[in-house]
Image (cartoon, helix red, strand yellow):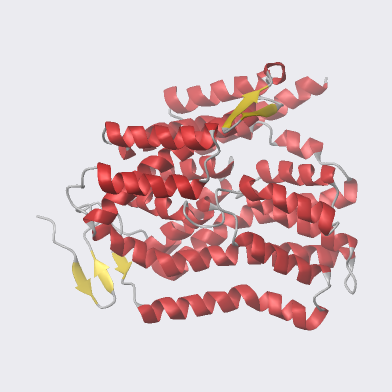
């Protein structure tokens, strides 16, 4: 018989599969980071496949519970989900490694591409090198959507909530917080209570920190200081009008309002960066977005490219390249530091709430809605991966996202089909599938240019 959970100091021990070593987990987080293409849908799919299906470090319930919380927060939900998962496995150091590694490959890639951009100009040839990744990630996303849907939707009521969430966000652009609030209410009033609010022995980890007011206050103060320290240092040394200071302040504000994913705030960032601050030109913003979409990591990493160009063009008292690199580092820090704050402060309370039947019902509603949201992200990603032009049409409250049929990328469709066959039929690994897709993407770029 499995033992019941028992208190142990400030932690709660539960029976679980053997906990991975910190070194082994770090290697897996690095592998996840390198494969984190395709925006939040693709990144969530990668984490689900690795953490739940391959390593079995997190149970399905634990994964969806964490995802439900992360979707409520401002900032990139996939990076926060990685931080949450790392924290579950190895506490604060685990969260720092998982969340930090998730950002690192994208940061290095965009920094290198930005340097090439200001040195040699347009990076279309580099974008073409990654052209095979998008359709391959689409196949990975669809596989994960099927798995998550089958395991998260247990009855017709949860399916109805998921369908309603998809319809609301895709066809009517209902704000995400409103969808979450309604899903929680429906879950509370309409769904059945789970057999055990603690989810029995499927915890998938060994230790859980107990929340406390003293810990919460200490963590909040420490991370707020860490977040704001670079901003204060820039204000004190360079003054409020310097480009690095203005970037630090502006992107700190952006980090607190990015609800609903990066696309919800990118229009505002582009307008401010181009029209208000003059850091870059409209066409350059599109180039940066292309970089962020075809490199690992969160799409919001495009702000690094914005900061790089802005600092490069107004570098004094530094050299242009020094100022640009500093702008990249500062902007990346103030974008992700609050993500660690939200997780390290809130996660212990979210875990404690798993033992409440009422909260479990509300979260079951949110989990169902999250499936609908992932479906929305998947459809959006599929349209933009396979078509060169996608239009949005509005009739009153109704909004339709429709592709231009003549802009279908036949090569991308073919790569998506090959990737789907590799995953669903041949059961290839994700790394092998992505490698094949990159090769096909390069070949297709050569054919198109011939």
| x and y percentages locating residue 363 in the rendered image | 33, 50
374 or 398, nearer to the observer: 398
Left or right side of 418 for 446: right
Name above or below for residue 289 compared with residue 11: above
Name above or below for residue 149 compared with residue 334: above
Left or right side of 291 for 213: left
Q: Which quarter of the figure has residue 313?
A: bottom right
Residue sitting at 25 percent across and 54 percent down?
Answer: 358
| x and y percentages locating residue 169 in the rendered image | 51, 38
Give the tally of numbered discs: 0
Q: Which quarter of the figure has residue 383?
A: top right
Q: Is residue 46 visible?
A: yes
420 or 197, nearer to the observer: 197
Residue sitting at 43 percent across and 22 percent down?
Answer: 425
| x and y percentages locating residue 53 in the rendered image | 36, 42
Left or right side of 434 for 248: right
314 or 133, nearer to the observer: 314
Q: Which quarter of the figure has residue 249?
A: bottom right
Name above or below for residue 185 compared with residue 402: below
Quadrant, the N terminus: bottom left
Quadrant, the C terminus: top right
User: In this view, which residue lies farthest toward the top?
Assistant: 406
Q: Is residue 60 visible?
A: no
214 or 440, nearer to the observer: 214
| x and y percentages locating residue 386 in the rendered image | 64, 25
Residue sitting at 70 percent across and 79 percent down?
Answer: 232
User: In this view, which residue lies farthest toward the left?
Assistant: 1
């Amino acid at each position: 018989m499995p033992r019941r959970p028992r208190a142990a100091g400030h932690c709660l021990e539960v029976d679980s599969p053997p906990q991975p070593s910190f070194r082994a987990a770090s290697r897996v987080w690095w592998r996840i980071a390198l494969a984190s293409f395709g925006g939040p849908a693709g990144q969530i799919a990668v984490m689900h496949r690795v953490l739940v299906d391959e390593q079995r470090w997190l149970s399905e319930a634990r994964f969806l519970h964490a995802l439900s919380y992360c979707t409520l927060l401002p900032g990139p939900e996939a990076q926060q989900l990685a931080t949450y998962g790392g924290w579950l496995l190895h506490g604060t150091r685990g969260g720092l490694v998982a969340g930090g590694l998730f950002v690192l490959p994208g940061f290095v890639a965009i920094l290198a591409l930005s340097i090439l951009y200001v040195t040699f100009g347009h990076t279309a040839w580099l974008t073409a090198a990654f052209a095979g990744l998008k359709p391959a990630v689409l196949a990975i996303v669809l596989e994960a959507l099927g798995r998550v849907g089958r395991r998260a939707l247990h009855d017709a009521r949860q399916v109805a909530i998921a369908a309603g969430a998809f319809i609301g966000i895709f066809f009517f652009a209902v704000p995400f917080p409103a969808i979450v609030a309604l899903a929680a209410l429906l879950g509370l009033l309409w769904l059945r209570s789970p057999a055990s609010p603690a989810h029995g022995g499927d915890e998938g980890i060994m230790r859980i920190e107990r929340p406390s007011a003293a810990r919460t206050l200490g963590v909040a103060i420490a991370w707020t200081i860490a977040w704001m320290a670079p901003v204060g240092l820039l204000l004190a040394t360079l003054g409020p009008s310097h480009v690095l200071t203005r970037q630090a302040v502006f992107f700190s504000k952006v980090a607190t309002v990015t609800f609903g994913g990066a696309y919800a705030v990118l229009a505002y960032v582009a307008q401010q960066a181009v029209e208000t601050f003059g850091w870059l030109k409209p066409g350059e913003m599109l180039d940066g977005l292309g970089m962020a979409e075809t490199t690992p990591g969160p799409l919001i990493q495009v702000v690094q490219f914005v900061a790089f160009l802005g600092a490069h063009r107004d570098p004094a008292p530094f050299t242009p390249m020094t100022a640009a690199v500093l702008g990249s580092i500062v902007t990346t820090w103030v974008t992700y530091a609050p993500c660690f704050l939200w997780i390290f402060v809130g996660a212990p309370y979210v875990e404690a709430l798993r033992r409440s039947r009422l909260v479990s019902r509300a979260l079951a509603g949110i989990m169902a809605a999250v499936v609908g949201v992932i479906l929305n992200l998947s459809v959006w990603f599929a349209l933009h991966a396979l078509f060169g032009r996608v239009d949005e049409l509005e009739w009153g409250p109704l909004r339709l996202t429709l592709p231009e049929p003549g802009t279908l990328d036949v090569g991308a469709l073919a790569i998506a089909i090959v990737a789907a066959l590799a995953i669903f039929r041949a059961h290839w690994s994700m790394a092998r599938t992505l490698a094949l897709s990159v090769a096909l993407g390069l070949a297709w770029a050569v054919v198109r240019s011939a």
